[in-house]
Image: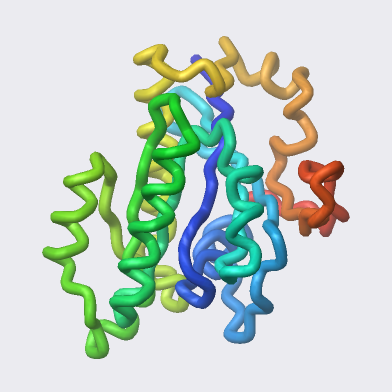
Amino acid sequence: MKHIVGKVVLLGYQGVGKTSTVTRYVENTFNHHVTPTVGASFFSCKIKVDENYVTLQIWDTAGQERFKAMAPMFYRNANAALLVFDITSPTSFEGMKMWVQEVKRNVEEAMVLCVVGNKTDLNDQRKVSREEAIEYSRSIGAIYLESSALTDQGTGLIFEKIAQELLKLSGEGSSSTLKVFDNDFMAKSSELEATDIGTEENVNLSIGSIAHGNSVQSRCC
């Protein structure tokens, strides 16, 4: 039995549903009036894959252009990137491609890429076809999934698939930043214990305190 701990960065334009997607999975909630993320928020949850455990440390980044320069601080040493676009917005789809280029420029090690077409509850207003999104995802070696944070359709599969792929990545030995423990006890006894139960933090914009936010009530997924 292994316990894998991986860093996941959540990227995409403002308004595509990044925060709604992660809070739907981690907290099983949906807020119709989500305040735009400032800087980044941090979430953590543990998923069982077969007889193993995978802890996802998820960094939900701001989608506004004015925060774009800060993004490299959050996706440095990332083991997976969750790239979200709105299926009703071709602009968000093209913007998502720019985030892919940024990640590939700044992350040298092997990582899991997962492209997500969100807002399938608005399928009658779809502007980005599933076929186009699948073709693009294949071209960059990414998984492609669709979801609706509103209806909770497909959100669980996103994070479960990332966990499965991180487990595969750990077996390949191609990532030195992916943390692998021989058992659950060792993981809990490490410095990662504070993020192992499922938490959300609003991260301070100060570069000096990039990994230290004001803790919000702990939540377990």
Q: How is the image coloured?
A: rainbow
* Quadrant of residue 30 within the rendered picture: bottom right
Residue furthest toward the bottom? 124
Q: Check the image and report above or below for 80 versus 217.
A: above
Q: Which residue is drawn at 55% across and 69% down?
A: 20
Q: In this figure, what is the number of numbered marks? A: 0
Q: Check the image and report above or below for 10 versus 125.
A: above
Q: Is residue 68 left or right of residue 135?
A: right
The answer to whether residue 55 is visible is: no
Q: Residue at x 24, y 40 (%)?
A: 141
Q: Is residue 195 left or right of residue 149?
A: right
Q: Check the image and report above or below for 39 versus 105.
A: below
* Quadrant of residue 19 within the rendered picture: bottom right
- The residue nearer to you, when weighing 19 against 30, is 19
Q: Where is residue 125 in the image (x, y as percent from the top left)?
A: 26, 89
Q: Is residue 196 left or right of residue 166?
A: right
Q: Where is residue 119 in the image (x, y as percent from the top left)?
A: 37, 76
* Quadrant of residue 181 within the rendered picture: top right
Q: Position of residue 24 (x, y in %)?
A: 54, 65
Q: Position of residue 167 (x, y in %)?
A: 41, 26
Q: Which residue is drawn at 45% across and 43% down?
A: 103
Q: Residue at x 53, y 73 (%)?
A: 14
